[in-house]
Every structure is written in C-alpha cells, then in structure tokens.
Image (cartoon, grey):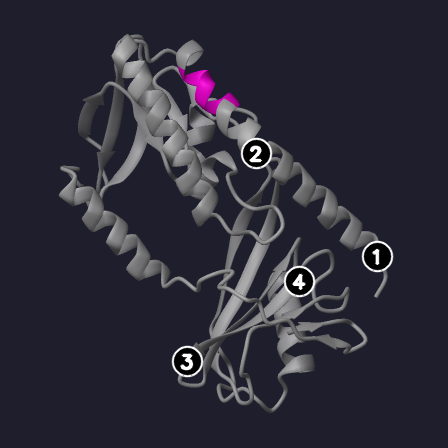
Amino acid sequence: SFFSPSSVIIDYTPSSTLAFVVDRGLFDRGILEQAKNKGVDVHLGEKVCRVNSYEDFVEIESGNEDCRKKVRAKVVVLATGINYQLPRSLGLGVPADFMQGTQTEVEVEGLSGTEIYVGKRISPGAFAWALPLGNGWARLGILAESKGVFHLKGFLKERFAGRIKQESPTIFQKRIACGAAKRSVRNRILTVGEAAGQVKTTTGGGIFYGLLCSEIAVRILQESFSKKDLSERQLVRYDRLWKSKLGKELRMGIWMRKIMKRLTD
C-alpha cells in the first residue's frame, strides 16, 4: 500500500513477486560458505591497514593491532562497503553524494502488508517503509538526505502511535552511497559494490547491483590474467562496462530524487 501526504491510499497487488526481504546476516554467511567451497582462503578477525600497489604485484598489510602481516597478490578487489579509508588512500574515487538509511525492528499491531509512505514531513525527497517480518514484527524505516533519526522518530510518532509495543526501540543508521565513484580501478586494483557506488539511487538497495558488477569484474579479470596484463589501462574496461550498464539508471534515480524533493505535499 502506498500512502500519500494527504493519507490517500493506493493498494497494489502484483501478479508475481517483485522483491524479497533478505536476512543479511544469513545471506552473507551463505556467500561465505560458497566462497569456501570454491577454495577461497578466508581470514576472519583481521583488519587490512594498507594496500600498496607496485608494478608487478600488490601488497596487503593486515593484522589485529600491529598490522605486521604482509601478503602479496597479483590483484586486489576492494569490497569495503561504506568504509572509504582504503579507496581514498589509493587515490580511487568515492561517490559524489550519500543518503541516510535509518530503521528499527519492532512489534507492530495491525500491519498486514508492506506500506510505503511519501511526503516532505516524513522523508523529504525520498520515502519511508513498513515491512512485515512475521510473528507481529516489522521493519520501520526511512531513506533521507540528513537527520535520519529525527525523521524516523517523527514517522513513528505520526503513523504508528499506540501500535508499537517497544517504548524505546533501538534505531540503526548507516550512510548509503548515491552515485558512481569517478574511479573504480587502478593498477592491479578495482572496487566493487558500495565501494564503487554500485547502489540504486532510488531505493538505496545494493545487493543486485553489486552482484551484477562482480560478474563484470570477474570477466575482465579473467581476460586480464589470460593476457598477463593487470595494468590500469587493461582494468579500466571494467570501469567503463559497469558504468555503461548502470550509469543511466544511476543518473535517472538522482534526477527523480531531485524532482521529488522540489514537489510540495
């Protein structure tokens, strides 16, 4: 159900499934197990402090506190998410803009289906959501340019007063990349996922775009290994390919959000 600022409700029932709600922890563990089954050597509990790029190899410095462990590799793929410390240190680009995703999980009365809310009072230029999880629990959240916690509390008070069992629910917030990074490759290094800005500029979702661009990265790396050329000149094809595939959608999403921000309720 879609709720307008004037409380007009539009109900829509699709003929087929449009989206899935993902348990991100379970999803990530599943990806990890698949990687292990493919022979990936996984190092948990280690922080990568630095990545140094040389002509013939890259060197990764990692560890718990001292970062004394050094590993050499032919190429490095950075999938650091919203943490841009490593990409910045390597001269790689970061997204031009960011949104705030803010949500909470609570027990809610009277929520039978997914609800989407729009309006300047609730979330200027974006939207809010109420998503049933089963057994009376739901995710309530908003996408906003700033003041995410403030807007979420206002949304809960205005739309769900008296329906939430928790008096002081825990609120989670994270930055969300909005727009492609200018550079996603360097000599023997490339970035994927949110590190490269591969996130839907309309909804803030990143799993599908990240997996799609990972397939492009794998294809270019395979070609690069076969040519024995992992230079930036060769890897830049990855940057061009994923941006040619998603660039129009990313720009369109930013354009639509700007229009929504200008609209009155």
For the residue pair 62 and 237, the one nearer the viewer reads as: 237
The location of residue 56, given as percent across then percent down, is 26, 9
Q: Residue at 46% of width from left, 17% of height from top?
A: 236
Quarter of the image for the C terminus: give it. bottom right
Nearer the observer: mark 2 or 3; the answer is 3
**What secondary structure prevails in the magenta region?**
helix
Tag shown at residue 127: 4
Q: Residues within 10 Å of mark 1 (few under 14, many from 20)?
A: few
Q: Residues within 10 Å of mark 2 (few under 14, many from 20)?
A: many
Quarter of the image for the N terminus: give it. bottom right
Q: Where does label 3 land, which residue?
A: 134
Disc 2 to disc 3, C-alpha distance: 35 Å
Q: Where does label 1 land, which residue?
A: 263
Q: Where does label 2 land, which residue?
A: 180
Secondary structure of the residue carrying tag 2 is loop
Q: Is residue 104 left or right of residue 146?
A: left
- The answer to whether mark 2 and mark 3 are in CB contact below 8 A is no
- The answer to whether mark 2 and mark 4 are in CB contact below 8 A is no
Q: Residue at 62% of width from left, 83% of height from top?
A: 160
Disc 3 to disc 1, C-alpha distance: 35 Å
Q: Which residues are magenta?
A: 235-240
For the residue pair 52 and 14, the one nearer the viewer reads as: 14
Classify 116 as above or below 29.
below
* Amino acid at pointer 2: Ala
